[in-house]
Image: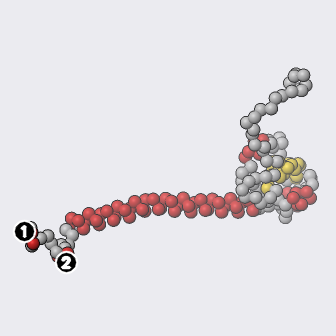
Amino acid sequence: APGGGTAGPAAGDAQPPSESALRLERERRQVRRGLATAVAVPAGLSAALGAIMVGYYVYATMNSVLRPSDYAALRPGTSLGAMDPVLPRMEVIDSGARRAEHPEPPGLSCRYYRADANVLAVGRLYRLCFDGDRLARKDVLLPPRPATTETEPQTGPETGAP
């Protein structure tokens, strides 16, 4: 070689990787594949479960709507059997806050239905209360008002202030 040094291997004379280098690369690929599986499987299952939950919520919402005209036509004393054709297949699944805010009348069992099919929020609810199998009471429950952070001064005869 010119300059008196020894020449390295020529570009075409590259040696194949050693057995240990091949094994190391194979193990690295296997670890990467395992890591990808460990992330992808739970993410996929979570996405599938989320889709099922959203699908059920939309289904339940659409099947718990009592049309306003049907609600208006219901009269106390009507039997549950006579109302079956107009009552939705399902009740509202998320009426807990309203139930707490408006307790059921003593001795009556109540059912809750949506007044509209808005899946993003629960607006008005219709509450039908039964004494046995007869409609005893019907109510419209309005959505709770959001709590305000400001407090208004209480004045007037209720507080004793002038």
Compared with residue 107, is residue 42 higher up or lower down, i.e. above or below?
below
| Image height of 148 relative to 117, above or below | above
Would residue 127 be found to the left or right of residue 20 on screen? Answer: right
37 or 157, which is in the foreground? 157
Which coloring applies here?
secondary structure
Give SS at disc 2.
helix
Between tags 2 and 1, which lies in front? 1
Q: Position of residue 83 (x, y in %)?
A: 86, 60
Picture quadrant where residue 9 is located: bottom left
- Residue 81 can be seen in this image: no
* In this view, 12 is above or below 139: below
Q: Relative to the observer, which residue lies in front, 74 or 115?
A: 115
- Depth check: give the residue in front, 45 or 33: 33
Residue 158 circle label: none
Label 2 belongs to which residue? 12
Residue 60, given in percent of the width and then of the height, sits at 71, 60
Tell me the distance, in whole angstroms, between the alpha carbons under discs 2 and 1: 22 Å
Looking at the image, which residue is at 19% across and 77% down?
12
Based on the displayed image, in which of its 4 quarters is residue 103 positioned? top right
The secondary structure type at the circle numbered 1 is helix
Residue at x 51% of width, y 62% of height = 44
Percent x, y for residue 125? 81, 52
Mark drawn on residue 4: 1
Pick the quarter of the image with the N terminus.
Answer: bottom left
Question: In the image, what residue occupies the spot 63% across and 59% down?
Answer: 53
Q: Residues within 10 Å of mark 1 (few under 14, many from 20)?
A: few
Q: Amino acid type of disc 2?
A: Gly
Tell me the quarter of the image containing the C terminus: top right
